[in-house]
Image (cartoon, rainbow, N blue to C red):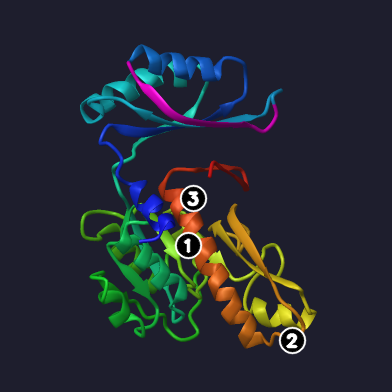
Amino acid sequence: MSQEHADSAARWEDPRDTARLLTTCQDRPGIVAAVSGFLYRRGVNIIHSDQHSTDPEGGRFFLRLEFYLPGLEERLDELARDFEAEVAREYAMDWRIVPARRKKRMAILVSKLDHALMDLLWRADRGELHAEVPLVISNHPDLCAAVESFGVPFHHVEVPKGARAPESGALAEHEARMLDLLDNAPGGPVDLLVLARYMRILSPAFVRHFPQRIINIHHSFLPAFEGADPYRRAAERGVKLIGATAHYVTGELDKGPIIEQDVIRVSHRNRVEELKILGADIERQVLSRAVRWHLEDRVLVDGNKTIVFA
């Protein structure tokens, strides 16, 4: 086992009494003191703390705390109730407390390309991603055997030829079927939906079911080359860098808040197929980092931007 993998696996050997507190509110003096004082009075040990202000004079304030509290499971409801009454209400906070030991339930949507999908399944299977994968959904049957080799149920939801997701109104039949699978997955509804090169546009009605809980990997360094076939367009423009972008999905195509990006240098010698091979590796890395940060509650959304405490 490499040191990198050992460090990643060890991350999830968390004591059962560790949790994360995430808060967002208008910035003003005293927020950190109020939060830390509240936790201190209850015997909480703060393990790690990150904070960010968009503007110290009237901006937004973001805080992520990791803490340890003996008997957390038994005391969690009381802690949350008291935090709301004594701190959150005064500062008009959006906040949540997340026990670190609880795995999020991550479903994956994919079409025919398997590189991003296989990477996520491998990392989840090895414990590098703190997630359960209750199902994979695809609009093609090709990857059934590969997915089921990980012990993960595979569902083929065919999209009628020429069908497009509606701009508004009722969900298309195939989207309604996917939503039923996701809401009734074994063990309960999913917490996160990852588009691992799912080559269909989801309707705004579908996206609204998972606000800030759908992560897409786009095979381009956004905002350059939005939409389809970016590697071909990059080759036509003679770019010297290609990249990948992981972002939350919104009702606008490839416009959601960006979580992570990376690039690799290329040249005029690289044909389109070579760009796709080079790009696939960047896609895997970018998507896995974005998914891991989401699973670890390291991403807070600020309008159409993100605050990432990585």
Give the secondary structure at mark 3.
loop
Question: Does label 1 or label 2 sit earlier along the sequence?
Answer: 1
| Residue for point 41% across, 80% down | 159
Q: Is residue 278 above or below residue 256?
A: below
Q: CA distance from mark 1 to mark 3?
A: 21 Å
Residue 168: horizontal and vertical position, in percent?
A: 51, 62
The residue at 22%/26% (across/down) is 71
Report whether residue 167 is seen.
no
Q: Earlier in the sequence, mark 1 or mark 3?
A: 1
What numbered label is drawn on residue 169? 1
Point out the stretch of residues depicted in magenta: 43-55
Say which amino acid is labelled 2. Arg
Badge 1 marks a residue whose secondary structure is loop
**What residue do we see at 52% from left, 64% from top?**
285
Secondary structure beneath dot 2 equals loop
**Residue that label 3 marks:** 212
Which amino acid type corresponds to the residue marked 1 in the rendered image? Gly
For marks 1 and 2, give the CA distance.
Answer: 47 Å
Residue 111 seen in the current view: yes
Of the residues under marks 3 and 2, which one precedes in the sequence? 3
User: Could you tell whether 178 is left or right of 239 in the image?
Assistant: left
Q: Main secondary structure of the magenta part?
A: strand
Q: How would you rate the neighbour count of disc 1 (Cα within 10 Å): few for under 14, some for 14-19, many for 20 or more? A: few
Q: Which of 195 and 263 lies nearest the eye of the viewer?
A: 263
Q: Is residue 45 magenta?
A: yes
- Residue 240 sits inside the magenta stretch: no
> What quarter of the picture does the N terminus occupy?
bottom left
Q: Mark 3 is on which residue type? A: Gln
**Looking at the picture, does residue 187 appear above or below residue 284?**
above
Q: Are marks 1 and 2 in contact (CB under 8 Å)?
A: no
The residue to which callout 2 is attached is 269
